[in-house]
Image (cartoon, rainbow, N blue to C red):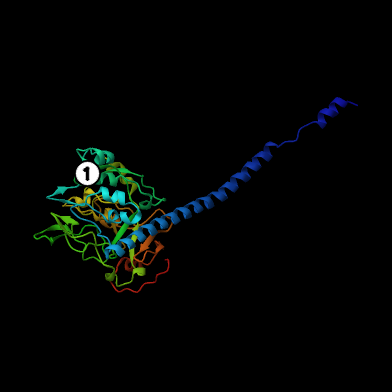
Amino acid sequence: MNWSRFLRIGSRKAGFTLVELLVVIAIIGVMVGLLLPAVQAAREASRRMSCQNNERQLGLSVQNFESAIKAYPLAAEFEVGTAWHSLILPYMEQRTLYEIMTFQEDGEGNYQWAFGVPGISGDAALNNRAYSRFFKNIYVCEQRLPSFRCPSSSFPDSAADISGDNWIVQKRAPTNYLGCVSGLLATDRRRQIATAPWGGTGATEVIHDLDGVFVNKMAHQRIRFNGKSWGISGMKMSAITDGTSNTIAIGEAEADVRDVPEMGLNRENNRDNFGRKDHWAFGGDDVDTNNQGDMSEHLGTTGVPMNSPRVAPGQTGFAAYEFCFGSRHTGGANFCYADGSVRFLSQQIDPKIYSAFGTRNQGEVVQTEDQ
């Protein structure tokens, strides 16, 4: 007997054949393919919950503002630049940022929300003696606060933004949360001749007579003008006759990421049906510029469908597109109501119900459950 051959055969090591290995790899691939959508869905559910928590914090801050001031925040200080996001900072543990800013642009001083192209950095605007007195607001515009940003957003953390006045914030931080100015309005241009509280008349964006939660209490409203104060408040809670649990105060909006390259190179064209779908916190130069008043930078409307399809600038319907709420969440967006509650609304919601949620005083009867 050939014992050496027998020993060689008996000592052969067990292992996978090529076919077996390929089968195992295929099985693993199928399992990964089955698990990946579930993992992605779980991650999106977590991001959606984080977004809802952001809106709850903003809603609570607005509630605390209303409790202290006895009115909701001023929506936007046209021809000055201030937006409602700045006014609630002391109520969300950001008083330091709030105290950096100056809300004033008049004969006593012009405190700007941008700087002439090519601009200055926020740090220089705050710390350089040549700039710090009048341009500190730029520093705040460049601060990325997580509470103002949806984690599902595809927009960059910051972007250069050249206004229609050819002034720039070099690294401006976007927001995904807009105040609801109306449930009926379908364009962000509402420039009218109106009387100023200090006398005289002139053209301005007029929103004090609109039907949303975030409006102004008068045309040409200034927080302060030449030593006189008209306050930081807008509408009183008593004006929400449809009920605070039936009225949207804050909604999600996703800026158009395709605008980013142009925003760093070209000034914004804010004529009717032109401009950009861009959304920013704190304040800005397009709201400041007295012949433009791009309110969709800080405010939105349920008067146009949620997640409206993109319309190119210059085309009919662009002014509605840039004014719409929406999100990167699947199938809808989060909204904070005037009572501080947060709900996810489907983009398939009945347009009449959606519009009614955006108005505060139209007398509609709407259901309050998630749509």
Residue 110 x, y percent position in the rendering: 16, 47
Q: Which of the image's four quarters has the N terminus?
A: top right
Q: In screen coordinates, is 123 left or right of 57?
A: left
Residue 96 x, y percent position in the rendering: 30, 49
Q: Residue at x 30, y 61 (%)?
A: 65
Tell me which corner region of the image, top left, top right, bottom left or bottom right, holds residue 191: bottom left
Q: Secondary structure at mark 1?
A: helix
Taking depth in this image into account, of 65 and 366 the one nearest to the observer is 65
* Residue 304 in view here: no
Residue 56 x, y percent position in the rendering: 39, 59
Taking depth in this image into account, of 118 and 10 the one nearest to the observer is 118
Tell me which corner region of the image, top left, top right, bottom left or bottom right, holds residue 85: bottom left
Which residue occupies the extreme right position in the image?
Answer: 1
Amino acid at the residue labelled 1? Phe
Q: Residue at x 20, y 43 (%)?
A: 133
Q: Which of the image's four quarters has the C terminus?
A: bottom left
On the image, numbered disc 1 is attached to which residue? 135
Is 309 placed above or below 211 here? above
* Residue 283 in view here: yes
Which residue occupies the extreme left position in the image?
Answer: 200
Q: Residue at x 26, y 47 (%)?
A: 100
Q: In screen coordinates, is 91 left or right of 112?
A: right
Q: In screen coordinates, is 247 left or right of 222?
A: right
Tell me which corner region of the image, top left, top right, bottom left or bottom right, holds residue 138: top left
Taking depth in this image into account, of 55 and 15 the one nearest to the observer is 55
